[in-house]
Amino acid sequence: MGSTSSMLTQYDIEAVQEHCNHLFSQQEIVSLYRRFCQLDRNSKGFISADEFLSVPEFSMNPLSQRLIKMVDGLNFKDFVAFLSAFSAKASVPERVKLIFKVYDSDGNGKVTFNDILEVLQDLTGSFISDEQREEVLCQVLKEAGYTRDSTLLLADFIKILGKPGLKMEVEVPVD
Amino acid sequence: MSKLNKSSSELDLDRPNIEDYLPSGSIQEPHGKLRLRDLLDISPTLTEAAGAIVDDLSILVVGSYRIVESRSESDPIRSNLQALFCIDLTILDPILRSDPINTSNDPTHSLHFLSMYHLRDDNREETDSFTRCFKSIPPEPWNWNVYLFPLWCLGVVVRYLILFPMRVLVLTIGWIVFLAAYFPVHVLLKGHDKLRKKLERCLVELICSFFVASWTGVVKYHGPRPSMRPKQVFVCNHTSMIDFIILEQMTAFAVIMQKHPGWVGLLQSTILESVGCIWFNRSEAKDRETVARKLRDHVQGADNNPLLIFPEGTCVNNHYTVMFKKGAFELGCTVCPIAIKYNKIFVDAFWNSRKQSFTMHLLQLMTSWAVVCDVWYLEPQSLKPGETAIEFAERVRDIISVRAGLKKVPWDGYLKYSRPSPKHRESKVAPGPFLKDDPIEGHLVVFKGLFLTIVEH
């Protein structure tokens, strides 16, 4: 009967809002909390990988295995922080930062040729062979002024992707 | 390739096609060249994943998917984009086999990312927006309280033991009056066609008023009443068959409806035939042509009853509007939108035809306090220059959705009736556990996100 959402106090909401740089409104946080509780089936206070994968659209996403590593065991605050990159108010660098994190699987702040290749592999599956993928990537990198051995930093990503037109918005249902 | 083209043209017209799903302008011009930016940009996939986490509904923004068509005319993908969007997964196989990458030695020739085909499992706990359109949403119970519960019990007694018998009586009287007048008019006035038509119209309006009275229908009509003139067609959002009764009470519309079994079917073929209603059978493809022809003839006639079409093609629960079929918008007529919004304070007027017979639905309405609804006759719209029928349909859907406060979703209502073919069970693209043998809700195999990038190098 909607009692779950009332468990958030005004203080909690403000704290969460602080944590996500005010990218979500208070109402959005309340509905995200409802969704969080729905996903957190055992009410442990965090969402496990299995629980994320129970959403069919998520589990079928080609990047789900990668994303799972990033979102496994998130508590509500971090859950909101993760999603804040998809808020309509998020800036382009904030969005690119998330994309960068997806590529940077070891978290050392650098994206190598192999990192990009792995993501491409996830996206294209078996439609393209490994050699073809490598060749395409090599050529495209070369045209953009990089080489096979260059590592890309967040700044590079912002330079490449940080143009208007990056569509990455998810509407939080507010009722 | 020629074989494929043929098969796509033979596809049932009801199947969704790409234009229906994509808002205009979303098919982008090809970049011409694959750039690093295109390779690195994984935002659509991420957005989709985040959408799935936040809400099952938000990933429906089909327009956010990038579809970049190949410039090459010989590319089979282009001509088969439409085929790709059909529900039949098996159609994908030949396309994947004729993959230009495999046939070409140059790997950079073209590259496409085929992301995934979402399969739905209706047995899941989580609801998706598509099934949400066809589910009655139960109201919050108000009778949980110790003080209110006895009151509610009293209400039940009044509704079932006093109101219901009274309403049955009203309806019976209505039928007796109607039948006593209808058959003499129908048989005796054979020579006076004009008079007969007029009387029959009045009688149909009368019986519909009796029906509305039998559920204590509190209907508020806004806007000017429909007029009888040629070359106009009325379109309305569809929640239940009672929409038809409510509208018919005011003006005798000729309506296009599915052929129903049982007593409703009998009424259709005897009485409603006289106001010029047209029936079709959803499963028969032949009917489609006949109906289209009848439609065109009907709108040309000057003294025919105004034509009413429910372009959604199916009952939706009055919270959403599903995609409009474009047929009504291709007739070259003025389209007069009608919006109906039910107030669910006493009863949910949504008729879930798969769970409930119409008789049960009527009983449900007759045992409730009242059916409250608003009907808006909106300003007639006509095709703007340069506008396609689909854009026109979308525009009218906007108008209706805004007026009635409904949420638009990009689904084709007919998918409710489609079931995947048994071949899907063996299909490698479709993992097994999604398909079970439940005939009722029909396991929808829907391409939710097809993210296809073909970049000519």
Image (tube, grey):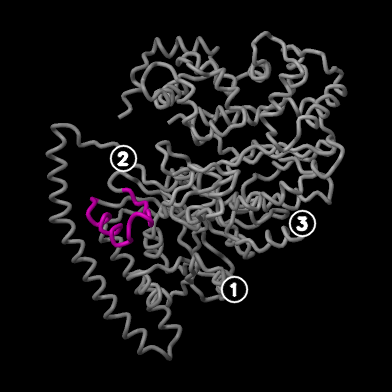
Which of B57/B102 is in front?
A: B102
The residue stretch that appears in magenta: B348-369
Callout 1 crowding tier (Cα within 10 Å): few <14, some 14–19, many ≥20: few
Chain containing mark 3: B
Which of A53/B160 is in front?
A: A53
Residue B354 is a magenta residue? yes
Picture quadrant of residue A62: top right
Q: Earlier in the sequence, mark 2 or mark 3?
A: 3
Residue A153 drawn at (x, y percent) = 74, 11
Whether residue A92 is visible to the viewer of this picture, yes or no, is yes
Q: Earlier in the sequence, mark 2 or mark 1?
A: 2
Q: Nearer the viewer, mark 1 or mark 3?
A: 3
Instruction: Please name the residue that numbered disc 1 is placed on.
Output: B293
Q: Quadrant of the N terminus of chain B?
A: bottom right
Left or right: B37, with B373 as reference point: right
Q: Nearer the viewer, mark 2 or mark 3?
A: 3
Q: Earlier in the sequence, mark 1 or mark 3?
A: 3
User: How far apart, in angstroms, are the residues tagged by discs 1 and 3?
Assistant: 33 Å
Give the residue type that dot 3 points to.
Met
Residue B153 drawn at (x, y percent) = 13, 43
Give the residue type that dot 1 points to.
Arg
Q: Residue at x 45, y 66 (%)?
A: B258
Q: How many marks?
A: 3
| Element at label 1 | helix
The disc at residue B139 is: 2
Residue A95 drawn at (x, y percent) = 64, 19
